[in-house]
Amino acid sequence: MAEAVIRGATHEDVDSVEVRVKTALDADVDDMQWADAFILGTPENFGYMSGAMKHFLDRVYYPCEGKINGRPWALFVRAGNDGTGAISSIRRILAGLAVREVQEPVLIKGEFDEARLADCEELGLTMAAGLEAGVF
């Protein structure tokens, strides 16, 4: 899923957007403050976001509070269950950062559906194109 999102965000039709890719354990406050927008991705673990994603959000929350207001964000989730716990918990945390969700999350649940990878690619492309066009 991440590879498809990255493929969309780096599409040849979008040339003025710089994409930085980091894992949740490698990303930090500087990355969040550098970004004009961000896309998060996580597996659903026990009905919640991954531990790595929670750790990332815990590390960046207070240093970013009041500094990234209004920035657009989007999400993709791979869920073995229904994905709602992962999505709602991330939305709740990001609401406190006053960032703006600009697309519905891409959720692949149950059996992996290769066809849904096009939705992931579209997520990345829409964010990049929206930034380039000044929509976000």
Image: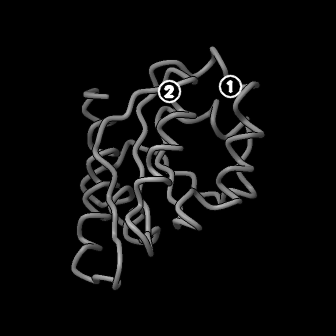
Horizontal side of 39 relative to 115 (left or right) equals right
Disc 2: which residue: 95
- Cα separation, mark 2 vs mark 1, equals 12 Å
Q: Disc 2, disc 1: CB below 8 Å?
A: no
**Dot 2, how many residues are within 10 Å of its Cα: few (below 14), some (14-19), or many (20+)?**
few
Q: Amino acid at mark 1?
A: Cys
Report helix, strand or loop for mark 2.
Answer: helix
Disc 1: which residue: 64
Against 51, residue 39 (above or below) is above
Horizontal side of 71 relative to 120 (left or right) equals right
Q: Amino acid at mark 2?
A: Ala
Report helix, strand or loop for mark 1.
Answer: helix
Horizontal side of 124 relative to 69 (left or right) equals left
Q: Position of residue 95 (x, y in %)?
A: 50, 27
Q: Which residue sits at x=66%, y=20%? A: 65
Residue 79, numbered label: none
Q: Which residue sits at x=51%, y=34%? A: 92
In front here: 79 or 40?
A: 79
In front here: 131 or 4?
A: 4
Which is more N-terminal, label 1 or label 2?
Answer: 1
Q: Position of residue 71 (x, y in %)?
A: 46, 26
Q: Position of residue 26 (x, y in %)?
A: 75, 56
Q: Which residue sits at x=34%, y=51%? A: 105
Horizontal side of 33 relative to 5 (left or right) equals right
Against 123, residue 118 (above or below) is below
Q: Nearer the viewer, mark 2 or mark 1?
A: 2
